[in-house]
Amino acid sequence: KQKDRASETLFDTQCPFCSVQCTMQLVEERVVERAHYKVIPKDNPTSHGRLCIKGLNAHQHALHPERLKSPLLKVNGQFVRVSWKDALDFIKENFRKIQKYDGFNALGVYGGGSLTNEEAYLLGKFARVALRTKHIDYNGRFCMSAAASAMNDTFGIDRGLTNKLSEIPFARCIILAGTNIAECQPTIMPYFHQAKQNGSYFIVIDPRETATCELADLHLKIKPGTDAALVNGFLKVIFDEGYVDYAFVDEKTEGFAELKEHIDRIQLDEIAQLTGIAPEVIRFAAIQYASAQTGMVFTARGVEQQTNGNMTVRNFLNLVLVTGKIGKLGCGYGAITGQGNGQGGREHGQKADQLPGYRDIENEEHRKYIADVWGISENELPRKGVSAYEMMQKISAGEITGMFIMGSNPIVSSPNAQFVKKALKTLKCLVVVDLFLSETAQLADLVLPTSSYLEDEGTITNLEGRVTLRPASKIPPKEVKQDWEILCEIADVLGRGEYFRFSSAEEIFNELRLASRGGKADYYGITYERLRKERVYWPCPSFDHPGTARMFEQSFAHRDGKARLAVVENQFPKEQITEQYPLYLTTGRVLSHYLTGVQTRKSPALASRHIESFVEIHPNAAKKYKIENNTLVKLETKRGAAVVRSKYSYKIREDTVFVPFHWSGIQNINQITDDSLDPHCKMPGFKICAVRISPIVNL
Ligand code: SF4
């Protein structure tokens, strides 16, 4: 919506920088030739008119003069501006050559969790129908895949939060594990503050005392990577001291006998030794949660981005289930999504193993349904491909020779990022779609400019599973196209345009609704018309369905309606500290940056708050390794080195250092993070690896 009021233009939009999707109005005031901007927070049922520092400055990158404004083709190592026709001809010639000589599966597609639902849906269809490749995955593999697979395994469906946020104040005990909400999703903190005022008991599990720890009644400063063992300790207490909700367990779960047998073997003293948390503290925490009338458990990347993230989350879900704390007011589980469309981005088919509506790409019935919606034969629909990091390995092995990347920056976001950079350099053709010449785009043969959140109409599904419509309120620069237009035009030049005849995001959404119909993530009853008036929770199978705010009130999504308990052994990080690499390295975010910083580093107000990376280190550890405060230091793992500035902090364990991941070049901490993958969900071991630290004497 755009209203001209003399020299004032108003843009209604939603902040793109996290899964809360706060609403705002951007006001452009023109005085002669100069434009001034101000941001007015707007009410919505999730964030209630709140904005954090990122939202207040989200427009700065979208209006940045370095935004890409035309396609760029690399000629003799230099980018030159070309027309869209030349860009499309380049793709046609190069992708066809790869398809002819290397095969259809030699093309890979890499998406992102910030794309709208329509774009994520269309990208999945584009890979499988236009490019006819099985290789598509996205950066959410590095973000939500452990929680998603654990919820699928346990509940039979993956929806990030099982309850709406407004139920948090009704929870009498809240466990926050590996989640720093105060810095990553600040505008939902008032729900937790309200719970605190209502007398909730807060248990925070984190090796660092983050800003979120202000909520904690009990902070368990756990040894990195031992979260699953800690939960085994909780379960031991709950089983031994009679806190199991047998009525719930008998009626609604499978696998209790096996779990009980396993927990009977657990020794609390051993758990205490593994985790660094005293047995009486484990007992106290377990009883606080189990004995509370209501309770909620939240996890995030701290426990999920591990090589055993899937099983770790499954143990937290065991905890929720054996105490019967789900499907009721103030009782549930939540994986706090990070990316702007972290929830919706994973529902509509841009994952290697899934088709739209969370359909299984290897299920014949599901394949037939989607093939019919797409108007292709079932045989034409490719099978399951490989995960995001495995695609990079396939590039390195010469099996994938061409790549199409949309809205992602894997050179900075992948583990062992130097390997990824080297791999991408070997491609015969790399096409990147982005707002800026990101680190990954700089390696491309062709870069295509895309629209920003202000210009891009589409739906986003927030962390609660609530679908919202973000209007396109600003006209994009002249040569810039929306992601869906780019995909349709490429499909057309590749001779597959008949499957991509869309003229608006709404038309794509209507096909998505149909494709999701009857699937687990059912959007059929959600229309743009409805979204213009309200935000709707999925599943929503019909027009008169109110949407599903609280999941699992009656049953779970497995065929028999029961949730699955799992035996979870004490898990350990793949990489253990040694004499050579004596510290744990963990990574995370800071308040003013988003993902790899491609957008927030272009926002002066945000970038100036954190202009460079840093390593948080306990002063006692710093003394041991001769590290002065506020000096440049080298961090080394088996995979290489990064250089950042030291920052003393008593808030971190002495055996652990923390580095944020928003920077590139020598500061990019993902150059040295662990690329071992979780066997269940293929999540890399971002959160824990063994590192050594040394001062830089001469730069
Ligand atoms: Fe809201 Fe998240 Fe944007 Fe902050 S970053 S304004 S919490 S959507």
Image (spheres, rainbow, N blue to C red):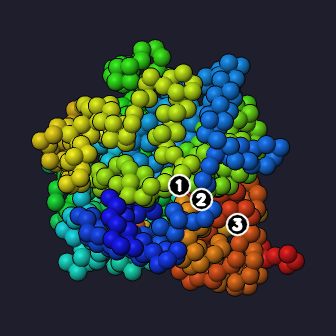
Looking at this view, is 687 or 512 the one in front? 512
Does the numbered disc 1 mark a residue whose Cβ is under 8 Å from ligand 1? no
Q: CA distance from mark 2 to mark 3?
A: 23 Å
Q: Residue at x 42, y 75 (%)?
A: 29
Residue where numbered disc 1 is placed: 477
- Residue 500 sits in quarter: top left
Say which residue label 3 marks.
Answer: 667
Write the residue at 47% across / 67% down: 59
**Considering only order in the chain, which callout, 1 or 2, is on the residue closer to the N terminus?**
2
* Local secondary structure at mark 1: loop
- Distance of label 2 from label 1 (alpha carbons): 9 Å
- Amino acid type, callout 3: Gln
Q: Residues under labels 3 and 1: Cα distance?
A: 32 Å
What residue do we see at 73% from left, 85% from top? Answer: 628
Residue that label 2 marks:
67
Q: Is residue 519 left or right of residue 568?
A: left
Q: How many marks?
A: 3
Does dot 3 land on a helix, a strand or a loop?
helix
- Kindly identify the amino acid type of the residue bearing the numbered disc 2: Arg
The percent position of residue 492, horizontal first and vertical second, equals: 52, 27
